[in-house]
Amino acid sequence: MVHTERRYLPIRLFRFFGIADGISLIVLLGIAVPLKYLADLPVAVTYAGSIHGAIFIGYVVSIVIVQLTVGWKLYWNVLAIGAAFVPFANFVLDRAVKKREAQFQTRAFPILWLVYAIIFFSFMDLFAQLPIISTFATSLGASTFIAGIAVGMYSLSNTGGNLLAGLLTDRFGPYRLLVIGLTGTAAMLFLYSAVESPEALLVVRFLHGFIGGFIVPAAFTFVANQSKENAAGSENALTGAFVGAAAIIGPAFSGILAAQTSAPFVLRIVGLFGVLLVIGAFLLLRGQLFKRSTERPEALTRNPALLISFVGAFLMMFSQGALAYLLPLRVEELGFSSRVSGTLLSVFGLTAVLVFISPIRRLFDRWSPLVNFQIGILIIALSQLSLGINNSIVTFYIIFCVYGIGFAFTFPSINVFLFKGTTKQNRGKAYGYFYAFFSLGVVLGSSGLAFIHPDVSVLFMVTCFVLLAGAITSFLYGKKGFSPK
């Protein structure tokens, strides 16, 4: 029987980060901001903002953990997120949660959550780069063309890392790949501080993408191998919640912090998180969960479920790559700063997370993955089209809420396709290919669109057409050869 005190661990973790977030917000607004404007000490906001941002990351992760382990009502999540932006609200919320603590008992914190944290880190690393790499490249003297190559270089080399990790995961088990990937990624994030030329940046981007590609196939292989056949959709939605949390925090965190400090400083903060995970993986995962497989890896078979998962991964990330390239340009056309782009991307991530952790995720088990996939891609495609024809920034926020719903339906469904189309003996290799298609989608969606047409609105329409064409093809192929259940 689990010790009584351990049942409260997730809720007390949330309370700890809530109080810390409330204190850091008061320090930021009540002390650092006045010092900046009254005493001409902008460095006060720089350091207080950095600390507050790091605490806020932990706070959001703790909210996700409580929702998934305790299963409290959805309005608690809304209150928790809202409290983070209102001075003293965290303390009021903490008092309310403390009174109800007995209602929030849960089991002891499982080691699997460390794997979720690793997945969060991997995507936090990805999303935190989006608003800052191109401007960092130009600050080093790179042309616009070279800056675009620097953005795409990570995803290009990440594809090779994904493929190699997939092959090695089935042979040696995920643990070694996770440790190598985490250690190398953390080192690369710190190495950006030594970059002084566009050429050096391209080299670091290549190495960063390649070694970072080791993490996700290994982590997702383990999570998938723990999934139950009749609950794969909802369990992959839980994984998606951490991806969505990274999408919420990453762009806004890096965009705001980089404006006050620098791109290398932001990446060092993310790298520090990676160092902590390396230590956690070495202490908690070694010899417990990730053991070398004694069974011979199986070859992948060509089947509709697996092929649709690859196409779905490509389409979803083609859309994300298009947003990374087109959204800042579109927002600038409307006369707004680039910070708005990061906020919009965070809105889509927040919406997706709310769907992932709400009872809606049960639909991912009840409905066919093919139906969920078609719903998701259709919503994403229409959202891309709407971004190209609307000129109201308020409408953009609504569109990104809808986009988040589409992402929430798409992500679990393509993972279910992969789950159904593989076995434990070849799932690592499959996830290697899966995330290679992820990376390929980002490259073609960002760099590839630049060669088609100079008009941003036209490129949003092109993106919509690509998504619809892929969805129709997948539907016809899936109806022909894939069992809906």
Image (cartoon, rainbow, N blue to C red):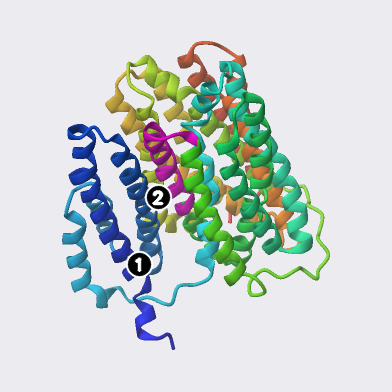
Q: Which residue is pictured at 57% across the width and 26% down the height?
A: 446
Residue 32 falls left or right of residue 114: left
Q: Which of 467 and 329 is in front in this view?
A: 329
**Residue bounds of the magenta highlight:** 241-263
Q: Where is residue 361 in the image (x, y as percent from the top left)?
A: 43, 56
Q: Which residue is pictured at 37% across the width and 78% down the height?
A: 7
SS for callout 1: helix
Tag 2: amino acid: Val
Q: Where is residue 388 in the image (x, y as percent from the top left)?
A: 42, 19
Quarter the N terminus occupies: bottom left
**Residue beneath disc 2:** 353
The answer to whether residue 379 is above or below residue 180 is above
Q: Which residue is pictured at 49% across the width and 72% down the height?
A: 110
457 drawn magenta: no
Q: Where is residue 16 in the image (x, y as percent from the top left)?
A: 31, 65
Q: Is residue 467 visible?
A: yes
**Residue beneath disc 1:** 13
Q: Where is residue 161 in the image (x, y as percent from the top left)?
A: 71, 45
Quarter the C terminus occupies: bottom right
Tag 1: amino acid: Leu
